[in-house]
Amino acid sequence: MCGIAGSINFPLNISVITKDLWHRGPDEQSTFSEGNLQLHHHRLSIVDIAGGQQPMHFQHLTLIFNGEIYNYRDLKQKFNLSNCQTNSDTEVLLHLYAAMGPACLEEMDGMYAMAIYDRRNNELFIARDRAGKKPFYYFTDEKKFVFASELNALRGQLDLSIDQQSIQQFIRLGYFYKTATAYKQVTELPAGSFAKVSLEKPVPQVTKWWNIHQYYKEKSSDSFDTALEKTDQFLHEAVKNRVEASDLEVGSFLSGGIDSGLVTAIAKKYNQSLRTFTVSFDGEYDEAPLAKQVADKYQTDHTEIKISFDNLLNDVEQILYNYGEPFFDSSAIPSYYVSQAAKKYLTVILNGDGGDELFGGYRRYVPFAKFDFFRSPFLLRKLASAAFTFLPVSHNKKSKYNYLYRLTDLVRKNKLGIYLSSTIDSFEGNEKYLLADHGYLDQIEQDFDDMNRSGLTGLQKLMNLDFDNILSGNLLVKMDIATMAHSLEGRSPLLCKNLLEYVPGLQDSFKIKGGQTKFLLRKLSEKYLPPDLIHQPKRGFEIPLKKWVDNELKDLIGDYIFSPNSLSTEFVDAGFTKKLWERKINTGEEKRAKMLWTLFALEVWYKKCYLKHA
């Protein structure tokens, strides 16, 4: 796991970029220069600590690489790479690219962002993994090309301007859409994509080499028992590779849910001295007793870590600063503290990320498994709209009434509004107060319409959209920044190549059965986990956002949002924001907190990331 950066026709300020990326790779730092090209690498040493230094050279190629290739030993044997001089996955990747070119990406199971300098073709090859676990941001103006693992590292090198439309989209969506960033001319290389960049004219030519959509369209004929067996087999292989592909100890997070429970149960088979970690938070639901049942069953070396938010007021600005862009998801805060605590014990840890998006773990999936709300008849929408006007606002997001309230709300919508109401649901219903350009969502709505015409079921559409948008644009970003801020590597077996390319094509009923979410994984859990865990509802981190907004962080949030040089007034009607603050807007308490938090995150980014380097 590392931090990478580089440039064409632009001299990097090495001391500044070293400071900005130090946390991603504190073990070694090195820079390679040739002609108009620079490559910079920060290493967090995990695989082949003695021999895996980068940049790495072979024949006419030079590589810098952030991530891990978990099946590198199998690939080394499969392609008879006997001339490798080290035991690193980096060298296997380099030799595979020399032999196969971009086709090598299809063979690899891993998380990665890479840049390979090809002297023979005078070009730079850049690529990201299937799910987009590892980030890759780049700036280009057709004369120069600059890239880095984090946006703050780019901002430290370049005089960047704010992309107004991307900010408008962020406020409505709650994340940056696909390639968009907060800065003009700065793009995120899409997940599952590669590009070739000429050193003579550095304009990336992007190719989408992997797309989960094609696997949703490939309908599997496997029976439930066969699917259960294959899922078990694939998960064993993924966990085994992620435990063994490390020279350092690999531990496991235990959240009290089935995803992390399954990962831990299988990991114990491949690491008899497995260390596990559970966290609990003051005043929140404590999953530690459920996690301890798994730890006791498999006799792991278990640690319960009590996390306090006592320092939140002092830490929150730094936590949000780390993202280098406005970041909406308030669960970034407990993720930061969890990673900080885990790093005291080890450097590599397994988690259950991706299980909900792949196997159907969210409660919102249940109604979509029964009916395609994306294609609701006009009459049904009108009836729902009429009913919604009489429903009192919901203030308890976990109640059955809130479920009904939000369901009625989304039924009355159409097109993109349905998706936004069923997922982030922040400024939905208050769009008229957003100071956005006409057509700022045109491309997003077109992409949504294409998905709606794809022939997938309602559940498949929703899960496909979640994978492409919320997982890639929010959840994986959150965990990458939260872990790497503490030089901690998180590994996600449920996002392995085999599961990503097998599970989408399974029948909907294998994922949602009646009112039961994640049905296939729950059945698999019966083989491995204590009964108390198997039918627990999904909780995730219980974020007391309303409490923070009204108490601990109230003054700080108010100071940012209502400061004289507030940026949010360019994007949201100031009168609306004031009324929202004073509770003069008829909206749910949770929704109010999310809207205020969005504006707070925007202001922290503007003042701490953007203006800091102005």
Image (cartoon, helix red, strand yellow):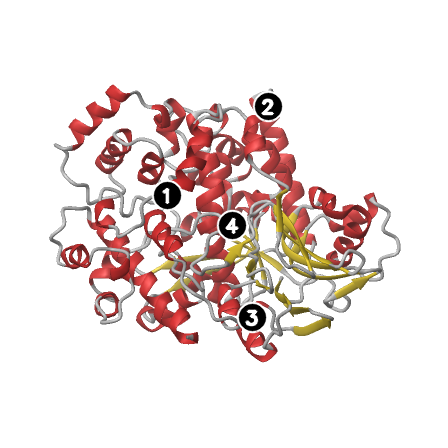
- The answer to whether residue 386 is visible is yes
Residue 102, relative to residue 459: is it above or below? Answer: below
Residue reaching furthest to the bottom: 15
* Label 3: few (<14), some (14–19) or many (≥20) C-alpha neighbours in 10 Å: many
Marks 3/2: CA–CA distance: 43 Å
Checking the image for residue 296, the label placed there is 4
Amino acid type at image mark 2: Ser
Estimate the x, y position of residue 597 in percent, counting from the top left.
Answer: 29, 58
Contact between marks 3 and 2 (CB within 8 A): the answer is no
- Which comes sooner in the sequence, label 1 or label 4? 4
Q: Position of residue 377 (x, y in %)?
A: 30, 20
Residue labelled with disc 1: 441
Element carrying mark 3: helix
In the image, what residue occupies the spot 57% across and 23% down?
219
Residue under label 3, please give it: 21
Quadrant holding the C terminus? bottom left
| Residue type, numbered disc 3 | Leu
Mark 1: secondary structure: loop
Q: In 3D space, how far apart are the residues under numbered discs 4 and 2 (Cα atoms)? A: 37 Å
